[in-house]
Amino acid sequence: MPADGAGVCCLTAMQGKYALPVSGRLTWIQLLRCGSMGVRMKLLMVDDEEYVVEGIKRHLDWEKCGVGEIYAASSMKQAQSIMEMVPIDIIISDIVMPKQSGFDFIHWVRDNRYRVQVIFLTSYAEFDYARRAISMNSVDYLLKPIDYEKLADAVCRAVQKAAQARQNEAERKESRLWRQNQSLLRRDFWMELLQGNITGDAFEEERTKRRLPYAGETQFLLLYLTFHDGMNCQGMWDEKTLYFIVENVLSEMLEGVGFLVEAVAPRGKGCSVAVCRRMESGVQTVKTLKEKGVFEQFIRWMGEKLQMDIWCGVGSLGRADALLNSFLLLQDMRDNSLSVWNRVLYQSDFECPETSLQNPNLGVWKALLEEGKEEELLASIETYLEELEEKELVTREILRVFQMDVMQMVYSWLERREIKAHLLFDGKGSENDYQNALKGMRSAKQFSCNLISRAIQYEKYINKTESVAEQIRQYIDVHYKEEIRRDSLGEIVYLNTDYMSRIFKKEMGVSISSYILQKRVEEAKKLLAQSNLPINTVSIYVGYSNFSYFTKMFKENTGYSPLDYRRKFRG
């Protein structure tokens, strides 16, 4: 409700006539819905003279003009309220009104960036009024008494301008959305190309579909980046922010040598590829880029500002159809230079090392593991890896050999203790550790530390035989109704089945099968004595679907048939 207390009323079409409010007065907002039409513009009339509004409303063919909704206000304050609630397209406003003029209202409209078409009305043929109306970019300026034909013509022109403004706004919005989505479209395009999903003739088809400005001879360059040893930089930078920084800083540095950064595409945790496009004015060779030190400057900036270690590989300059091969070569470069950080490696200069390395410490590690000297073992492994890194000998293949040496050492040690290593280390977490161990020295060290520590801790756990026996007993107490196999119990505690059985019998005084039988008999006795369940239901409940076998088993262990037991012991 507006501050001046005016009410709100809606005019409705009734057999061609308009029903007024009961009071007979024009309220501050009146809406006329003109029915179905192609263009449905919203028009606001602002005039403190009621008869003027009524005359305009009755004399114009709104459907022909293309106006679908009409609102009316008798003051600037009421008009402002309507503008804030309704997306008005056209305003017909009197100039002279009490308190504030039509010019004041339109100034407010323009200041608030409402895109509307304006028609001014006035009873005064003042030159200054006409000049101000023109300066406010109005559609027309009409004198009272109103010539309705001229007003209808002005409204039609205003509708056309409003329709054009709508179309222009839609195009601007589409353009904004296109610009916003362009980076995503480019990134997705290059991700698909580097995954091998866009090859041959499909390149031109996809380029055209996504409106990418790449001619057949356009030259591109790949930059392969890995941050913090392939680990996600949690705590400092999330990946989205990191890639945003990469794209903006690299774009600024490459601009001076005629290159554009088309996209920064993620390639796994902590890894990304920057696709750079050479402009016609760009330098002609990678050698020139190297001489200018552009990428070296980029690596220094990233390291200093973000406090991060970075591996950086630069591919060869070539057409789009050669980028997939360049990317694969860069990946191979990364796999064969895992100890090189904060330097720029160029594909054209790189020579794959031929390193065949025997681990001289493996015998010492095995001895330390046998003796349970966990700290000394982990310290020796860390020293070995650090020496490899200092000599820049860390490659993916060397890490694979190191990983296999450690795994075989630990698995053999567990097997001698009848612990099933493949079950102990089964699971998604172990698989992730396994994959990450091949990405760099830090992750390889973390993998070996986790593997050895968990193995030693579990060996200490099973040496407390009561722990294993208690874990099995608790499982049987919960699952006694089900079929329980010894192999399944062995998997629960990661132990060889026979070894597990020996531990259980030693601690519990009975075999596993005897304990299961005792548990079922005890539960059957409770049900027979304390419930009205049919005996065959009791049999099924405690895990015996064969009623005859249940009866035999129960009598052998209690001296009574189930029926006799119920008769004797039922309370």
Image (spheres, rainbow, N blue to C red):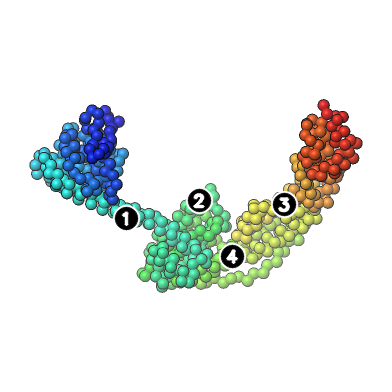
CA gap between label 2 and label 3 equals: 34 Å
Q: Amino acid at mark 1?
A: Glu
Identify the mark at residue 171; answer none if there is no mark.
1
Q: Residue at x 17, y 42 (%)?
A: 59
Residue 237: tell me if it is visible.
Answer: yes
Nearest to viewer (mark 2 / mark 3): 3
> Which quarter of the figure is the N terminus placed in?
top left
**Nearer the N terminus, badge 1 or badge 3?**
1
Q: Position of residue 75 (x, y in %)?
A: 21, 34
299 relative position to 69: left or right: right
Q: Position of residue 372 (x, y in %)?
A: 76, 51
Nearest to viewer (mark 2 / mark 1): 1
Residue corresponding to mark 3: 424
CA gap between label 4 and label 1 equals: 48 Å
Q: Nearer the viewer, residue 152 or 502?
A: 152
SS for dot 2: loop
Q: Residue at x 52, y 64 (%)?
A: 195
**Nearer the N terminus, badge 4 or badge 1?**
1
**Nearer the N terminus, badge 2 or badge 3?**
2
CA gap between label 1 and label 3 equals: 61 Å
Residue corresponding to mark 4: 335
Q: Nearer the viewer, residue 20 or 131?
A: 20
Residue corresponding to mark 2: 237
Nearest to viewer (mark 1 / mark 3): 1
145 relative position to 275: left or right: left
Q: Nearer the viewer, residue 389 or 260?
A: 260
Q: Amino acid at mark 2?
A: Trp
**Nearer the N terminus, badge 4 or badge 3?**
4
